[in-house]
Image (cartoon, helix red, strand yellow):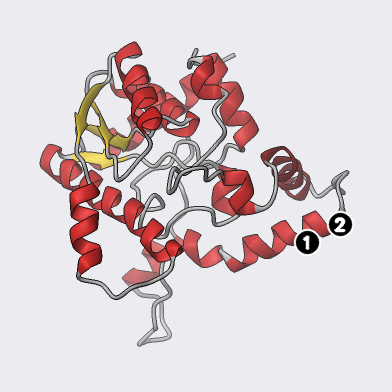
Amino acid sequence: MEKLSERIARWIRGRVIRSGSGGVVLGLSGGIDSAVAAVLAKKAMGEEVLALLLPCHSLPEDEADALYLADLFHLRRERVDLAPVCDAFLKQLPPAGIACRANLKPRLRMAALYYFANKLNYLVMGTGNKSERLMGYFTKFGDGGADLLPLGDLTKARVRKLAKELQIPDRIIRRPPSAGLWKGQTDEEDMAIRYRDLDRIIESLEDSREPRISRGKVEYVKGKMAKSRHKRSLPPIFRLKLKRSLNSRDQKRKPIKG
């Protein structure tokens, strides 16, 4: 039976070929999601993969783990320090809360990724997983901005299993999941739920069965999913005519199966 990693690699390769692109570029953060995505990209595209290290007042250990993974799997890489850009940008903006400042980082990274994608005729590969996407735990037009999402239908638990299949180092698998937006920040604290519970709820909802977990947590997740739906959708378009247009065909196009 074909392994999951082989299925995803074949899907990546097919999407790249179908688009007429030459490869993929992705951000390498040092975390498990970007590590798994990068190794899958390497399996799919060989040398036509560019891993970007995009520190922006980031923790040194994040970059150290990203470099370690890149060296271990022989990934072609570039480093762009976005801290000076971020600082200069913020000087031109009015003061705002930590969320506004933190969300600027992934949006700057998205701009850098597409710069290299345009330069190389590559696709931008996102690294988000199903658990965080359904919770809306990503930045719209930031880390949510990508051309393909190979992990988008995998819960965090499945990403961890896939990481072991791909022989990702334990030091990366065991790291507390974090977007690295500020020191001490973790995914589970921000989302106010553990991935273990979140994944159980997602799987139960998809299977239409009652999850063995508190009703309060289930309703909390459902609320987050509903509130963040706009982040996973194309912008709505005002229809000038009632008949079908080319716009509607784009928005209703079915995804291509791997």
- 155 or 243: nearer the eye? 155
Q: What residue is drawn where x is 26% and y is 41%?
A: 123
Disc 1 from disc 2: Cα separation: 6 Å
Q: Amino acid at mark 2?
A: Arg
| Vertical arrangement, residue 169 with respect to residue 64, above or below | above
Q: Which residue is mark 1?
A: 219
| Residue 198, visible in the rendered structure | yes
Q: Position of residue 162 (x, y in %)?
A: 55, 23
Q: Residues within 10 Å of mark 1 (few under 14, many from 20)?
A: few
From the top left corner, tell me how far across and down residue 116 is, in percent.
Answer: 17, 41
x%, y% of residue 26? 31, 36
Residue lying at 34% horizontally and 37% vertically, measured from the top left: 15
Q: Total number of numbered labels?
A: 2
In the shown orientation, is residue 51 left or right of residue 185?
Answer: left
Q: Which residue is mark 2?
A: 215
Amino acid found under the numbered disc labelled 1: Glu
Q: Quadrant of the N terminus?
A: top right
Q: Residue at x 43, y 74 (%)?
A: 236
Query: Which of the 4 image quadrants contains residue 107?
Result: bottom left
Give yes or no for contact between labels 1 and 2 (Cβ–Cβ under 8 Å): yes
Numbered label attached to residue 132: none
Q: Is residue 3 visible?
A: no
Q: Is residue 144 above or below residue 178?
A: below
SS state under label 2: helix
From the viewer's perspective, tell me whether residue 221 is left or right of residue 208: left
Residue, x 42% and y 26% (percent of image)?
35
Indicate left or right for 18 with 100 as reference.
left
Nearest to the observer: residue 45 or residue 97: 97
Nearest to the observer: residue 82 or residue 73: 82
Residue density around tag 2, few if under 14, some if 14–19, many if 20 or more, within 10 Å:
few
Instruction: Kindly state the secondary structure of the residue where label 1 is placed.
Output: helix
Q: Position of residue 111 (x, y in %)?
A: 23, 52
